Image (tube, helix red, strand yellow):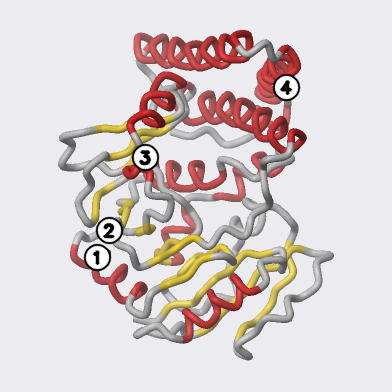
């Protein structure tokens, strides 16, 4: 099996990026090439293993993944963020799972949602953001009508999923190109990176690709992202979260649905998310946060009505 390691970066991950590069060269199946797509205007990182090739592209989490990959000459691609670590046999094991289960895409579970304590489970379930499923022998992650996702509380080593985390995934170049991520560049208009992984994997699922989640410990997310503890970043994240949920719900859950009873149920699920979010802010006396949330929904609705959104190819 020959594959190309494809990395998206702004060149700011530092030693975490060096850890990733070192772990790639230590693989039992080494990459045939390492291609790094770096955003325009950012300096090349000092970290190196001497074999990587840099390509300048437009900045954006989706823009740096929705590419033609003309530089990739292999059938397989290992798509990576710049802040992950892979065990020596991670690629070999993921490829083996793809062959064993006759699947198209595999991604490791790097955020370990199944390990959440019950208090967090309860809060996330009430909010409509996440839901822990028990006694499910088949699905790992599923997309819910609220535009959130559910996860398997007691997963097997490998399970089929409708969505996944995106810091690391192994797939064939052809099927990946077929999902037309270039149609989803609208997500990059958000001021904070959020939701592009769910769009990517759910679109794979809707296109008929078999997507796997690997619950082994062969890949770690080192998290080079900024601290979200500041009030400004927290408010930005709240805005992005509701804006994304509204647009994703409309594009991927409401429009493709042909059953009106299911559409009505989907609308009720999204309204519940809005109501819970508003009540939570009211109980805390956070009128400023409530204003941000209403603004996010209003902006999302304006975008859905815009010519730019209406011109997007429909999800069928």
Q: Nearer the viewer, mark 3 or mark 4?
A: 3
Question: Residue 299 shows which numbered tag?
Answer: 4
Give me the C-alpha separation between circle 3 and circle 4. 32 Å
Give me the C-alpha separation between circle 4 and circle 2. 38 Å
C-beta proximity under 8 Å, tags 2 and 1: yes
| SS class, disc 2 | loop
Question: Residue 103 shows which numbered tag?
Answer: 2
C-beta proximity under 8 Å, tags 4 and 2: no
Q: Nearer the viewer, mark 2 or mark 3?
A: 3
Question: Residue 116 shows which numbered tag?
Answer: 3
N-terminal of the pair, mark 2 or mark 1, is: 1
Residue 157: horizontal and vertical position, in percent? 22, 56
Q: Residue at x 50, y 58 (%)?
A: 167
- Name the foreground residue: 61 vs 71: 61
Give me the C-alpha separation between circle 2 and circle 1. 8 Å
Residue 228: horizontal and vertical position, in percent? 67, 43
Residue 238: horizontal and vertical position, in percent? 65, 29
Q: Residue at x 72, y 22 (%)?
A: 299
Check disc 2: other Cα within 10 Å, few if <14, some if 14-19, many if 20+.
Answer: some
Question: Residue 131 shows which numbered tag?
Answer: none
Q: Residue at x 37, y 58 (%)?
A: 108
C-beta proximity under 8 Å, tags 4 and 1: no
Residue for badge 1: 97
| SS class, disc 1 | helix
Check disc 4: other Cα within 10 Å, few if <14, some if 14-19, many if 20+.
Answer: some
N-terminal of the pair, mark 4 or mark 1, is: 1
Q: Which quadrant, please, contains the N terminus?
A: bottom left
């Amino acid at each position: 099996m020959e594959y190309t390691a494809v990395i998206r970066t702004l060149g700011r991950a530092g030693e975490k990026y060096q850890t990733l590069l070192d772990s790639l060269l230590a693989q039992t199946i080494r990459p045939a090439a390492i291609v790094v797509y770096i955003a325009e205007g950012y300096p090349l990182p000092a970290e190196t293993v001497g074999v990587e090739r840099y390509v300048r592209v437009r900045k954006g989490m989706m823009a740096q993944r929705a590419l033609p990959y003309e530089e990739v000459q292999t059938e397989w691609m290992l798509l990576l963020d710049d802040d992950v670590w892979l065990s020596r046999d991670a690629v070999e094991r993921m490829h083996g799972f793809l062959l064993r289960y006759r699947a198209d895409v595999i991604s490791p579970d790097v955020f370990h949602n199944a390990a959440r304590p019950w208090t967090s489970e309860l809060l996330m379930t009430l909010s409509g953001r996440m839901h822990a499923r028990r006694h499910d022998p088949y699905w790992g992650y599923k997309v819910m009508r609220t535009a959130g996702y559910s996860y398997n509380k007691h997963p097997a080593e490998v399970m089929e999923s409708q969505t996944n985390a995106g810091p690391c995934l192994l797939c064939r170049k052809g099927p990946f190109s077929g999902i037309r991520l270039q149609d989803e560049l609208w997500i990059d208009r958000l001021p904070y990176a959020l939701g592009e992984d769910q769009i990517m994997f759910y679109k794979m699922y809707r296109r008929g690709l078999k997507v796997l989640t690997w619950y082994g410990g062969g890949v770690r997310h080192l998290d080079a992202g900024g601290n979200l503890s500041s009030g400004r970043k927290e408010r930005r994240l709240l805005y992005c979260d509701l804006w994304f949920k509204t647009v994703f719900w409309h594009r991927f859950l409401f429009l493709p649905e042909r059953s009106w009873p299911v559409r009505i149920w989907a609308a009720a699920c999204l309204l519940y998310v809005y109501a819970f979010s508003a009540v939570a802010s009211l109980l805390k006396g956070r009128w400023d946060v409530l204003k941000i949330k209403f603004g996010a929904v209003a902006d999302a609705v304006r975008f859905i009505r815009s010519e730019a959104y209406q011109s997007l190819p429909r999800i069928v």
